[in-house]
Amino acid sequence: MPFYDLYCPGCDSEHNIMATMADKTNKNIPCPNCGSKDLETLYRSAPAYIKGGGDVPSCANAHSCGAACPHR
């Protein structure tokens, strides 16, 4: 079962709840604080992709390989 980040406007709380997709779709998930089933899905942005680190030297052939080469 997946985890969902849910917000309860009834008690102004956020929860990370494991539930079936059917329970989420049918609003069968009660708020752990107040019991309301009027929970809203929180959409969070994906983490940023970080290529390499600050101490990794750049590729000398970046002009031809697009800096995505394995020969750093």
Image: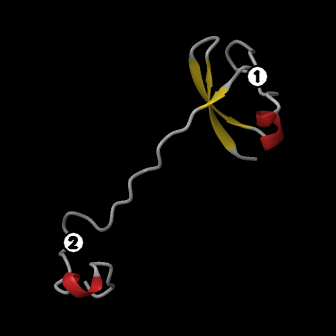
Q: Quadrant of residue 10?
A: top right
Q: Are marks 1 and 2 in contact (CB under 8 Å)?
A: no
Q: Which mark is residue 30?
A: 1
Residue 13: x, y in percent? 57, 19
Depth check, front residue: 22 or 3: 22
The C terminus, quarter of image? bottom left
At label 2, counting other C-alpha atoms closer than 10 Å, the crowd grade (few under 14, some 14-19, many 20 or more) is few
Image point (83%, 40%), residue name: 22
Q: Quadrant of residue 31?
A: top right
- Give me the C-alpha separation between circle 1 and circle 2: 48 Å
Image point (47%, 44%), residue name: 45
Depth check, front residue: 26 or 2: 26
SS label for mark 1: loop
Image point (34%, 61%), residue name: 50
Count every numbered label the image shows and give the total.
2
At label 1, counting other C-alpha atoms closer than 10 Å, the crowd grade (few under 14, some 14-19, many 20 or more) is some
Circle 2 is placed at which residue position?
Answer: 56
Residue 53: x, y in percent? 26, 64
Q: Which mark is residue 14?
A: none
Residue type highlighted by circle 1: Pro
Give the vertical position of 10 relative to 71 (above or below).
Answer: above
